[in-house]
Image (cartoon, rainbow, N blue to C red):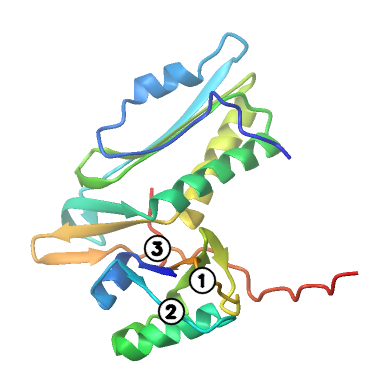
Amino acid sequence: MGVLFFGRLKDVAGHAADSAEVADAATIEQLFALYAARYPELAKYRSSVVASRNQEFAAWDTPLRSGDEVAFLPPVSGG
Amino acid sequence: MVTLPHDDIYQLVREPIDMAAQIRLVRAPEDGAIVTFDGFVRNQSHNRATLYLDYEAYESMALAKMQEIGLQIHEKYRIHRVAMVHRLGRLEIGETSVFIAVSAPHRAAAFDACRFAIDTLKRTVPIWKKEYFEDGAVWADGELPPAPAATPRAKPAS
């Protein structure tokens, strides 16, 4: 599945896009934990991140399927 | 399901926004009012002189969220047409980053819809700005969009 990082999360993860394989029915929370283990700095931002699945805001316990597009979004600052 | 009028405009652009052109596009003989919002780059942030801003977006989702706001204001207010344009990339001081124009038969609905649109855009549309100063750059403080707290459990099929 495709995983996207934006804003400061992109800086912390060092890239804007990645592809990940997760176990069937793994949640967005578990996917984030996978990246937080790889980039410990990322864990600090957990409470100020929202996730989206297929371009809709999604709860952290949302189960994932292969082919999903998940994005981790810091607080938005458009306008 | 309500669908967006096909003459509404929702765009992410990398060139300067032509505000007069947007206003012309929402203006129609049956309307009596257009309210616009012009958001532009301020020369300072928390008393530090800003050099310029750089905007990025999750483009496909940002456009979808902008259209969702359009649907909401068409449902809530008696308005006619909406133009909502956000610029991305590097913007200099004074340049317009976001422009919204709402036309309506009467002014109250246009004012209310335009205010709702910019307030909701700033809270929910995945766009980010990085502020550049003499001595470095920071991602602007923003608002965390409201997300579902937990997934409702699916009901067993009956």
Q: Quadrant of residue B1?
A: top right
10 Å crowding of disc 1: few (<14), some (14-19), many (20+): few
Residue A14: percent from the left, percent from the top? 23, 74
> Would you say the residues marked 1 and 2 are in contact, meaning their CB atoms lie under 8 Å apart?
yes
User: Residue at 52% across / 60% down in the picture?
Assistant: A54
Callout 1: SS? loop
Residue at the right extreme, as displayed: B158
Callout 2: SS? loop
User: Residue at 29% across / 86% down in the picture?
Assistant: A39
Q: Which amino acid is tagged 2?
A: Glu
Point out the tag, 1 or 2, that comes first from the N-terminus. Answer: 2
The vertical placement of B66 against A18, above or below, is above
Residues beneath discs 3 and 2 located on the same chain? no
Residues beneath discs 1 and 3 located on the same chain? no
Label 1 chain ID: A
Q: Which amino acid is tagged 1?
A: Ser
10 Å crowding of disc 3: few (<14), some (14-19), many (20+): some
- Residue sitting nearer the eye, B44 or A30: A30
Please name the residue that numbered disc 3 is placed on: B142
> Would you say the residues marked 3 and 2 are in contact, meaning their CB atoms lie under 8 Å apart?
no
Q: Is residue B77 left or right of residue A29?
A: right
Please name the residue that numbered disc 2 is placed on: A21
> Would you say the residues marked 1 and 3 are in contact, meaning their CB atoms lie under 8 Å apart?
no
Please name the residue that numbered disc 1 is placed on: A66
Q: Which amino acid is tagged 3?
A: Gly
User: Residue at 29% across / 70% down in the picture?
Assistant: A10
Q: Quadrant of the N terminus of chain A?
A: bottom left
